[in-house]
Amino acid sequence: MEWVISIVVMLSLVGSVMWIKPSPRERMQSQIRLHARALGFIVQIATIETPRAKGEMDVERKRLPAYRILRSDLSRDEKDQWNSWQAFRVENVANQGLPSQWSWKRGEGILTSEQCQMLSVVIESLPESVFALESSPMHFTVYWRESGGPEVLDQIKAAIEPVLKAKF
C-alpha cells in the first residue's frame, strides 16, 4: 500500500513539473519576441476591430500580437500633420490602392498614389500570417499571428523598412 501512495505522489510531482514547463509553441513565441526586441519592436497583445468583410454584417474583434516600432524620427510638424491609416487582410469594398484581399479600416484616399504603390509592394512581400498594418505618428504596427520563426520576423522587418523610411 505504501508503494502505491509513493507512486501517486511521484506522478503528482511529475505532473506538476510538466504543467509548468512551457510548450513548444510558447518556447517559439519567446524566441520570436526576444528577437523582436533586438530588432527594435515592442510586442503587445492588442484587440483590434476589423473592417466588415464582404457579405458580413458585423465587424470582428481579434486579439493578436502587435509588433510596434516607435517613430522617434518625426519632427513636431510631421507629427501634427500625420495621416494615420489601418489596412487589413480582409476583402472589402474599401480597397482603393491596395492589393486584392486587403482593405482599409481607416485612411482610404489619404495616401498619395506613390505611397499606395509602395505600400502595395510592401504588403505583397509580407507573409500570409500578417493580418494588418497600422501607421500613426507614435508607431508603425504589424499585427502578426507569429507563425514561423525569427527568420519570418526578419522578413517582416525588411519588408516594412521602406514605409518607415518614407514616413507615412
Image (cartoon, rainbow, N blue to C red):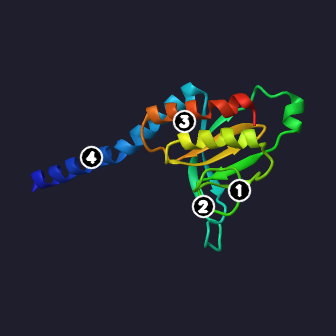
Q: Nearer the viewer, mark 4 or mark 3?
A: 3
Q: Quadrant of residue 78?
A: top right
Using a 10 Å C-alpha cutoff, classify the residue at mark 2 as few (fewer than 14 neighbours), some (14 to 19) or many (20 or more).
Answer: some
Q: Position of residue 125 (x, y in %)?
A: 54, 39
Q: Quadrant of the C terminus?
A: top right
59 vs 7, left or right, is right
Amino acid carrying label 1: it is: Lys
The answer for how far apart the CA atoms under marks 3 and 2 are is 22 Å
Mark 3 or mark 2: which comes first in sequence? 2
The residue that disc 1 covers is: 105
Q: Position of residue 39 (x, y in %)?
A: 57, 27
4 up-or-down from 77: above or below: below
Q: Position of residue 30 (x, y in %)?
A: 46, 36
Q: Nearer the viewer, mark 4 or mark 1?
A: 1
Q: Quadrant of residue 93?
A: bottom right
Which SS class for mark 2?
A: loop
The answer for how far apart the CA atoms under marks 4 and 1 are is 50 Å
Q: Quadrant of the N terminus?
A: bottom left
The residue that disc 3 covers is: 156
The residue that disc 4 covers is: 13
Which SS class for mark 1?
A: strand
Mark 3 or mark 1: which comes first in sequence? 1
Mark 4 or mark 3: which comes first in sequence? 4
Amino acid carrying label 4: it is: Leu
Mark 4 or mark 1: which comes first in sequence? 4
